[in-house]
Image (spheres, helix red, strand yellow):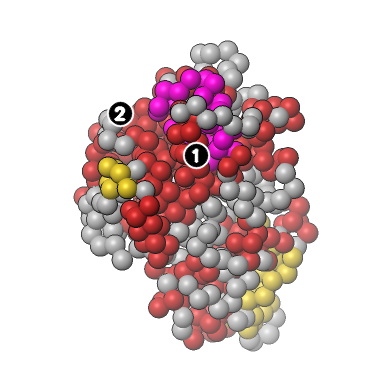
Amino acid sequence: MTLADPSVEVFILGLTPTDIPSDVLHMARRCLVDTIAVWAAGTTTAPSRIARDHAAKRYPGTLPMPFDGRVVNPVGLAFAGAATVDALDAHDGHQECKGHASVALVPALFAELGRDSCTMDALLCHLVVGEEVAIRCGLSLHATAPDYHSSGAWNALGCAAIASRLRGLTQDKTRQALGIAEYYGPRAQMMRCIEHPTMVKDSSSWGALTGVSAADLAEDGFTGAPALTVEAPEVAGIWSDLGSRWRILESNFKAYPVCRWAHPPVEAILALMRSENISIPEIESITVHTFHEATRLAARRPKDSDMAQYSLPLAVALALRFGTILPEYLLPENYDNPDIWSLVDIVAFEENDECNAAFPGERYAFVTLELKAGGHVKSDFKAARGNYDAPLSDHELIEKLQLFARKVLDDDTRASIAGVLTDPANAPSPADLMTMFQRVRTVS
């Protein structure tokens, strides 16, 4: 930034597109397009339908909900949008935060833009502000609190930052909004959802709702306790490089719509099957060697898509059966069959010290296959595809958009959205995107 040693509030309110390096703007485009892809795909899920019905009923307004059309207020749009993205565990994340920012930030951004127009560079600048604040709040929370809290606990502050910026709040009111968002943020115990998967997911829906509501309250003069994840002396180092180190560049992207902790064993078993030219009938048993937290993704007969996304044995079985995992594979009508369960039942876990030592900076796993003919084969250690140091290519993200959103958005609409990443000079404006969000084929 041009401002020397900016405070958090000065950064939030003062950042301009010209302050942002080109690679950071490009990463913001990647986050935007990927989140839109998951948002569209998420509308086909039961949690999204319920959340959108709730928003239409409880938060009436004038803004059409993306991929729905019913009108709600900004809080309702942010809540329903984040619930929809969170309904399909395929959105971008941050390894050290053990969670997700864009899932809440992108819906909150469109909620706050409303019917106003702005340039794409301006929209990306707003998103970068939210990402830099949210990720640092996540790092601060994990550094100072003993429990593993859900993403809504910290992405709420990124949403509050975006809303404060777009509303032109003063520095003091922006500080109050951050304090309100942190105090009211959903500090949910994340491992409860890992072990008992339901529609509450990562509480990002409540993070988005809290962040936008916090700006509402601050704008009207409501005050909040100082946000410790921003102002506590012990986290000062996390904020000292704000505006010079761009944490958004550490974002990872998902190749599969399941918990990221299940991705390394999926990569490991697919690579091993290819390298050893093994067929499924040759396998007697599968042992996944991984870190402790991943072994708790242990559901073996998930009843619905929400449970399926947190079942490591099912993820391995689906990858073996189909060679990849697409959203529709996580529906009971597609996985609830003897061929899948016979694979699920031969998956075992073994906690590994090296994998434990690497977590959360890296998620590693390897697999061992016992063969019916005798003997065994072992894979190399594998990480999830799409980490920030080995990212999915722009082409892969566009392919994901095409595969995930094809049931909701037509070919021309998907191509236009892809242009945000592939053809920035001719990309649709934010207002154009909001119009495109209403071109829905079918939503169940």
* SS at circle 1: helix
Q: Which residue is mark 1?
A: 211
Q: Identity of the amino acid at label 2?
A: Cys
Residue 10: image location, x then y, percent? 53, 19
**Can I make out residue 275 in this image?**
no
Instruction: Answer left or right for 107 relative to 359.
Output: left
Q: Identity of the amino acid at label 1?
A: Gly
With respect to residue 234, does 64 lie above or below?
below
**Residue drawn 63% across the image and 32% down it:** 225
Q: Earlier in the sequence, mark 2 or mark 1?
A: 2
Choose between 75 and 117: the one closer to the eye: 75
With respect to residue 141, does 227 lie above or below?
above
Furthest residue to the right?
Answer: 353
Choose between 174 and 259: the one closer to the eye: 174
**Residue drawn 47% across the image and 39% down it:** 213
Choose between 252 and 59: the one closer to the eye: 59
- Residue 166: within the magenta? yes
- Which class describes the residues within 10 Å of circle 1: few (<14), some (14-19), or many (20+)? many
- Residue 34: within the magenta? no
Residue 188: image location, x then y, percent? 62, 53
**Residue drawn 37% across the image and 41% down it:** 74
Residue 214: image location, x then y, percent? 50, 36
Q: Which residue is mark 2?
A: 118
Q: Which residues are magenta?
A: 156-182
What separation in Å lies between label 2 and label 1 (alpha carbons)? Answer: 21 Å
Instruction: Answer left or right for 354 relative to 172.
Output: right
* Image quadrant assignment for residue 366: bottom right
